[in-house]
Amino acid sequence: MALDFEGKEPLYRQLASILRGQIASGQIPPGRRLPSKLSIRQEYGVSQNTTERALQLLREEGLIETSMGRGLFVTQPEDRPKPQAGQD
Amino acid sequence: MALDFEGKEPLYRQLASILRGQIASGQIPPGRRLPSKLSIRQEYGVSQNTTERALQLLREEGLIETSMGRGLFVTQPEDRPKPQAGQD
DNA sequence: AAATATTTGTACGTATGTATG
DNA sequence: GCATACATACGTACAAATATT
């Protein structure tokens, strides 16, 4: 998956969608660590800010938890809140 | 109210708290427009980024709504979601 | 109608602090 | 002590929607 830099969908939302998909599909299973923010940034070619915003969305959705100095982790499904409307 | 630039509390949280207080106290009543992001930035001496993050918190809490090109508005209390824990 | 100003939204880059390994 | 990784914060630029002149 790659970002559409020309599209109207904001990059941080696109990035969030991609990562959300990887979590939903089990490609990155619960408890597993995600790539570091630096890796994500480099892989998708976006800024730290954009990466941060994307991750914050996932954090709000309860899909990931961040552990300072350790990394980003996929939450256990039973720990996730009920999804509200409008998260694609 | 002013920000404590030396304190350990992040500036964006401090700023959010101040604005939250102004809303809660009725100083800025429901339906009323808040100062623009530029004004906020200038008044408190923080960056756009920091202002944005503070406002995003309030947006998540349902205290404000933003209207592109128009401004930031205090939501009607009946439109706000039940407050979750940990919003000081 | 048209140009200008205001205001929010997105995005970049950079620097520094703090926690963990 | 050093490397890795997340967190906060700064400044800047431009796009998009709205309001004003």
Image (tube, coloured by chain):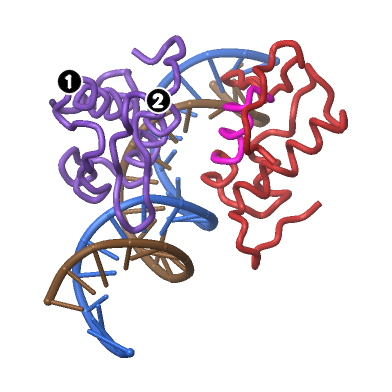
Chain colours: A red, B purple, C blue, D brown
Label 2 chain ID: B
Closer-to-camera residue (D13/A76): A76
Q: Say if the magenta span includes residue A60.
A: yes
Q: Where on the picture, by quarter, is residue A82?
A: top right
Q: Nearer the viewer, mark 1 or mark 2?
A: 2
Q: Position of residue A13 (x, y in %)?
A: 62, 47
Label 1 chain ID: B
Q: Which mark is residue B25?
A: 1
Q: Which mark is residue A63?
A: none
Three-letter amino acid code at the position of disc 2: Arg
Closer-to-camera residue (B48/C6): C6
Report how many numbered discs are placed on residues in the image.
2
Q: Which mark is residue B80?
A: 2
- Identified at 60% across, 47% down, the residue is A12
Identify the secondary structure beneath mark 2: loop
CB of mark 1 within 8 Å of CB of mark 2? no
**Could you classify mark 1 by the number of other residues whose Cα lies within 10 Å: few (under 14), some (14-19), or many (20 or more)?**
few
Q: Position of residue B44 (x, y in %)?
A: 19, 38
Stretch of the chain drawn in magenta: A53-63
Q: Main secondary structure of the magenta part?
A: helix
- Identified at 17% across, 20% down, the residue is B25
- Identified at 24% across, 29% down, the residue is B19
Image vertical order of residue D6 relative to residue D10, above or below: above
Closer-to-camera residue (A64/A78): A78
Q: Where on the picture, by quarter, is residue A19?
A: top right
